[in-house]
Image (spheres, helix red, strand yellow):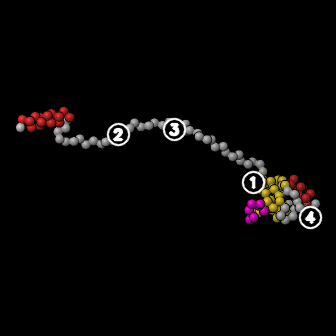
Amino acid sequence: MKRLLQFAGAGALALVATGTFGVAKAAAQVPVVAPIIVDTAAPIIVNAIKPKPKATGLVKFQGFVMHANIAQVTVRARNNEQAIQSFPLGEKASAKMQQIVDKGGYQYGDKITVYYDPQSLKAIKFKGKPSPPI
């Protein structure tokens, strides 16, 4: 019994030293983590994107002639058979078309490239070899 009292006394002394008298403290076990502060003021540029320059000049339309006279030219696109564009001719293009019409003009199916103004859709110039007259 003496041994039991010594053991009980040692256990009671241990409880007093730790501050727990048979009751466990309830505490959250969340680790304390210091917040990571990241500087977001300056972005990191990996590869700069270069914007394409906007076309302020003429736009090119390649295709086959469906009809051409000194006032306008109607062209079917090369890559899309259903895309048909009619372009009114400018002064210089009309004078050039008059010379071509005097020699026989463009025939149906001749290859042509029309350079036009995208806002007014007016043909400024065109390139293409007319076929011989019939």
Whichever of labels 4 and 3 marks the residue nearer the N terminus, that label is 3
The amino acid beneath tag 2 is Pro
Total marks in image = 4
Label 3 to label 2, Cα distance in Å? 26 Å
Whichever of labels 3 and 2 marks the residue nearer the N terminus, that label is 2
Q: Are marks 3 and 1 in contact (CB under 8 Å)?
A: no
Dot 1, how many residues are within 10 Å of its Cα: few (below 14), some (14-19), or many (20+)? Answer: few
Instruction: Locate residue 1 relative to residue 133 in the image: left or right.
Output: left
The amino acid beneath tag 3 is Thr
Label 2 to label 1, Cα distance in Å? 66 Å
Pointer 4: what residue?
A: 133
**Quarter of the figure that contains the N terminus:** top left
The amino acid beneath tag 4 is Pro
Closer-to-camera residue (80/120): 80
Q: Residue furthest left?
A: 1
Label 3 to label 1, Cα distance in Å? 43 Å
Which image quadrant for residue 88?
Answer: bottom right
Q: Magenta part mainly helix, strand or loop?
A: loop
Residue at 84% of width from left, 65% of height from top? 108
Q: Is residue 32 magenta?
A: no
Identify the mark at residue 40; answer none if there is no mark: 3
Counting from the top left corner in percent of width and height, residue 85 is at: 77, 61
Q: Residue furthest bottom?
A: 134
Residue 27 in view (yes/no) = yes
Q: Residue furthest right?
A: 103
Whichever of labels 3 and 1 marks the residue nearer the N terminus, that label is 3
Identify the mark at residue 31; answer none if there is no mark: 2
Closer-to-camera residue (77/7): 7
Query: Magenta span covers which residues?
Result: 75-82
State the SS at label 2: loop
